[in-house]
Image (cartoon, coloured by chain):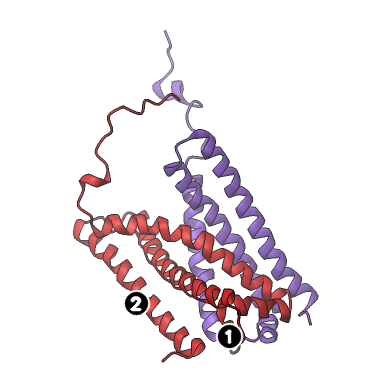
Chain colours: A red, B purple
Amino acid sequence: MAKNPNRPLSPHLQVYRWSPQMAVSIFHRATGFVLATAGMMTLLWWLSAIGGGAESYATFVKYVVSAGADGSAVQIASNWFFRLVALAVTFSFFQHLASGLRHLVLDIGAGYELKTNRTWASVAFVAAFFATAFVALFVASRFIGVL
Amino acid sequence: MDSRTNIGRVRGLGSAKHGGEHWLKQRLTAVGNVLLTTWFVLSLFMIPSFEHSALAQWLAQPLVAVPMILMIANIFSHVKLGLQVLIEDYVHDEGLKFASMTLLNFYVIASAVFGIFVVAKLAFTGVPA
């Protein structure tokens, strides 16, 4: 298909004021991408480290969870990287779950009234935020020794 | 002059009856993911110890290995459907689109097979030393 780069374009996202409904839609895609890549690769690494035996699991722990007292600089940097990954994946999980459930409701034809639609889009964000905060605090108190 | 009815004229020329397949599969795997990932997250909260031997014994049980394999298969088929839509919507160059779609299929199938193999091996051959 030949495409003329100079053809006029119809007004797109930039002409609209941002609303929760628009944000929840693009977040659903972005969080899906995070889960599909970072989330699943970390899960597969964890599973294969368990399957690989005690030594391979120790390597996983050193790089992902905690390098320990004699950890190298690379391992400590890797720990912080994976803490960010864990936070992003946790938020992505709950955000994708909440907006996904919203989509399933919309798919049966319910929830299109303007106010209802807006409310549940906002609820998806709030629910994801609090669920992520809960998990982060739980992990911090139980595994990292913070709190 | 064509004396057939309107419906007779268009019958057989329409869709291949697969129009809703992608959409429906995406929803079915989504519902499956809700169930399977809920199981997984609750399990993570209930695992008593994250020592290697405890985790390996946990994962080798049939009632853990089977849902884990189901979860890996279901998630990666959902990933395939979802990322396919991202590529279709945002990658406009035909060549790049074809390459992305090929890579996506490689990624999804290789990852799923790897994950299923890891869990099955542990479940069938037992916990390694």
Task: Judge by depth and name the residue closer to the eye, A67 or A8.
Answer: A67
Residue where numbered disc 2 is placed? A130
At x 42% / y 13%, what residue is drawn?
A: B3
Q: Which residue is at 64% across, 59% downward?
A: B112
Q: Residues within 10 Å of mark 2 (few under 14, many from 20)?
A: few
Quadrant of residue B77 within the rendered picture: bottom right
Query: How many angstroms separate mark 2 from mark 1 (CA)?
Result: 23 Å
Looking at the image, is B93 positioned above or below residue B54?
A: above
The image quadrant of residue A58 is bottom right
Q: Are marks 2 and 1 on the same chain?
A: no
State the quadrant of the C terminus of chain B: bottom right
User: In the rendered view, would you say B66 is above or below A24?
Assistant: below
What number is the disc on residue B47? Answer: 1
Q: Residue furthest front?
A: A73
- At numbered mark 1, what does the secondary structure look like: helix, strand or loop? loop
Contact, mark 2 vs mark 1 (Cβ under 8 Å): no
Where is residue A50? Give x, y as percent: 68, 76
Instruction: Please name the amino acid that badge 2 sits on.
Output: Phe
